[in-house]
Amino acid sequence: MANVKNIINAYEIAKERYAEYGVDTDKVLEQLQDFHLSMHCWQADDVAGFEVQAGALSGGIQATGNYPGKARNIDELRADILKAKSLIPGTHRLNLHEIYGDFQGKVVDRDEVTADYFQSWMQWGKENDTKLDFNSSSFSHPKSGSLSLSNPDKGIRDFWIEHTKRCRDIADAMGKAQGDHCIMNVWVHDGCKDVSVNHYLYRELLKDSLDQIFVEKKENMKDCIEGKVFGIGLESFTVGSHDFYTAYAAKNGKIPTIDTGHYHPTESPADKVSALLNFVPELMLHVSRPIRWDSDHVTIMDDPTLDLFSEIVRAGALERVHYGLDYFDGAINRLGAYVIGSRAAQKCMLRALLEPSKKISEMEIAGKGFQVLALLEECKALPWNAVYDMFCVKNNVPVGDGFIPEILKYEYSVTSNR
């Protein structure tokens, strides 16, 4: 158990150190309190969902690992999420896929889903101070194949158009119920495993599908569209590439989703922030750790994530970005993965907020390159961890590695019995 007196003393020292650089740590703590992650429900059960007719994962998605104790039903998943939230400082949202509806043993195809199957989620969110975000689900279905919204077969394409329209209706109902916009993401795996000569046709069809899906304006939700380089089994061509969705979003006022695992290894997702925000209203993030491209390892406090959040703060775009997590690691304790990734994202945002960015910016504009580099390096060694510890204390959650015994206790008493 951390000594609270020592934490407070360490914070006071950190506060003085940061004040020397013109940074008010009390204000930063307030900003971090308003930093709400959208936790991804699919970490708790390896993207299985609750459809009665559910099949194996397909459509470019692969969850790895077989650590015991994954959630098997809606009650277990909700319990795991609440336990994770109790170990993460702050107030956070929950990001749902359509396949996580409360179907209660009823076979409901994806072009038949309605907000009725998510009423219990809305009530759960209200009871647990958790606002909801949403995603359409075009994968792991008999009609998924290689092409969904870009399928030349009109029957299949219309099926997925109807599905996505209904998902927008559900997201709108969620937003209305919670009094805050529900952020809905559209990602489809569409692509080709081998050589294709119909790139333009598929993209023309995808554009037409999106135009049909978005024709109805919604007051209580916001639309996001997510690109990708390629999917597993669809390596040669991706219909919804980054270029495609960037152009569509800029033309139609939609929100691009930056998934940190969906770029070439040498690309910097952080650099997309300032480029896109000049042309689109907002951004959505799906933050993971791509050890080997889109491997979806648990988010940690690594350079790419630090760079990403730093770019957002430096651009003055805190209110224009929505912050979601997106990894599904079944190789380690899934609850532990939730907590590690969420706290790591918070630490990255904290370090970005603690940077004396105005001072450094002025130095750069004045041509003081040496001073800029020197100050950025010094910032890395400032006592940011004492500020995060104080943030945990203020939110009454374990400090440092104090969450580990809590997770092990939960595993012993709950998940090991599944």
Image (cartoon, grey):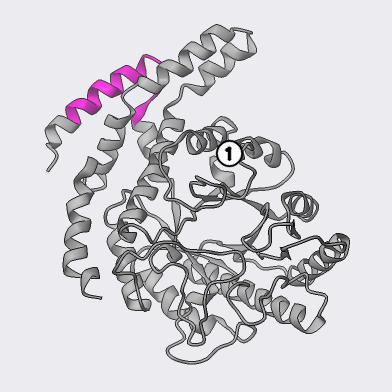
Quarter of the image where the N terminus is located:
top left
Choose between 97 and 289: the one closer to the eye. 289
Q: Please say if 198 is above or below 13.
A: below
Magenta region: 8-25
Q: Amino acid at mark 1?
A: Ala
Residue in the image at 47% along x and 21% along y? 356
Mark 1 crowdedness (10 Å alpha carbons): few <14, some 14-19, many ≥20: some
Q: Residue at x 41, y 31 (%)?
A: 351
Residue that numbered label 1 is attached to: 317
Q: Is residue 305 above or below residue 150?
A: above
Give 296 or 73, whichever is nearer the viewer. 296
Q: Main secondary structure of the magenta part?
A: helix
- Left or right of 95 in this view: 404: left
Considering the image in quadrants, where does the C terminus appear? bottom left
Q: Is residue 192 above or below residue 57?
A: above
Q: Nearer the viewer, residue 347 or 12?
A: 347
Q: Position of residue 283 (x, y in %)?
A: 62, 48
- The number of numbered discs placed on residues in the rendered structure image is 1
Measured as percent of width and height from the top left, residue 200 is found at: 87, 60
